[in-house]
Image (cartoon, grey):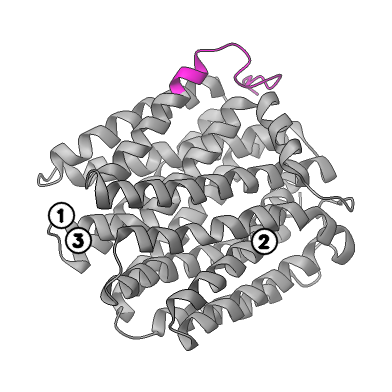
Amino acid sequence: MRWATYFAVLAAVLSVGLALGMTMPLVSFRLESWGYGPFAIGVVAAMPAIGVLLGAKISSRLAARFGTANLMRLGLWAGAISIGLLALLPSYPVWLLLRLLLGMVLTIIFILGESWINQLVVEQWRGRLVALYGSGYALSQLAGPLLLGVLGTQQDYGFWVSVALLMVSPLLLLGRSGAPTSESCNVTLMDLWRFCQELPAIGWAVALFATFEALILTLLPVYCLSQGFTEDVALAMVSTVVVGDALLQLPIGALADRVSRRGLFTGCAVILLCSSLAIPLLLDSQLIWPLWVLFGASAGGLFTLSLILIGERYRDDALVRANAHVAQLWGIGCLIGPLVAGAGSQWVSGHAMLLLVAAGAFGLLILLLRQGAFGNVQAQPL
């Protein structure tokens, strides 16, 4: 196995997580300071989701034309330019367009990065190494709000540090090999429908985690502020959720190499459901801090297990297309989640964000009761 390449690809993707962890809360705070409500902030949060759908559609075609490593480098540099323009052009309509572009280019990076990692790892280490990717990405997002707290939200330092990261990280990919090959084709919504029919539990879990992550980085800070917490405490709560995601991914990955992955899926869904419903009840209690950890860990576990099963099943172009479907589902979750939660928070209930996550977890549990929820993928101990 090419360990140096694995860690180079991992580091490149983690730079994206750190940049997003800084810029997404910063955008939300900046919009709130301009007087925009939760729904308007939710619209901005949903714009990258449209970009995700566009990026997923063209990822295979572009990878076939430029090559995986070259395309990842171009995507990272394009992301740096997009974030830089957020700082230079502080306008709501312009930010909508820039967030659309950012969603498109970063989606291509995630599709190729996850495919490259899943192609590299050996089967007996798949659960742990894919979990290390998930854990590392969560930690990079955790570091984002923490670093933003140090840099402050009144200035544009968070934007410019993110630009620097995305300008330097492509250099790590120079001379790396072992990337999956890809054929020149578009990935359509009809292809996505067939993928979801074949692996319905994975499709639902990915869309649910996408909704969860979009809400955590955009509406959770606003939710905490609306519940009377200071900006520093709101950022700390967001970071605690990401800590939970990061801390338990490696144990989940290790278990996935040894026990039933269906059982792990079910356990994560149950914990996510219960924690979502308990947070409003315990928000003013000290118990809220460990509850935030469980909330993040259970949602992250669903996504990690989905990637493990996809990597077990597919190779090369099929692997790239499967991860493109993951990106499409991610886009759908990121598009619907902030819009529904933002509208619900403004006009129905302040706790709409958490109720939406709880509903998604309950739906996944219902799906897991059906035969064929994982298609022909059988999670057998290795």
Q: Residue at x 37, y 63 (%)?
A: 41
Specify the amino acid type for callout 3: Leu
Label 2 crowd (10 A; few <14 / some 14-19 / many >=20) = many
Q: What label does residue 109 carry, if any?
A: 2
The Cα atoms of the two marked residues, 3 and 1, are separated by 5 Å
Instruction: Answer whether labels 3 and 1 touch (C-beta < 8 Å).
Output: yes
Percent of width and height locating residue 228: 12, 59
Q: What label does residue 154 carry, if any?
A: none
Magenta span has 381?
yes
Q: Which residue is mark 3?
A: 225
Percent of width and height locating residue 315: 81, 40
The Cα atoms of the two marked residues, 1 and 2, are separated by 36 Å
Q: Residue at x 50, y 50 (%)?
A: 334
For the stretch drawn in magenta, the main secondary structure is loop
Give the magenta-colored segment's residue range.
365-382
Q: Residue at x 28, y 34 (%)?
A: 275
Magenta span has 322?
no
Q: Which residue is mark 1?
A: 227
Of badges 3 and 2, the one in the foreground is 3
Horizontal side of 268 relative to 118 (left or right) equals: left
Please tell me in which quadrant of the rendered image residue 326 appears.
top right
Against 61, residue 175 (above or below) is below
- Going by the picture, which residue comes out furthest to the front? 347
Specify the amino acid type for callout 2: Ile
Helix, strand or loop under label 1: loop
The Cα atoms of the two marked residues, 3 and 2, are separated by 32 Å
Percent of width and height locating residue 245: 41, 46
Helix, strand or loop under label 3: helix
Q: Residue at x 21, y 68 (%)?
A: 231
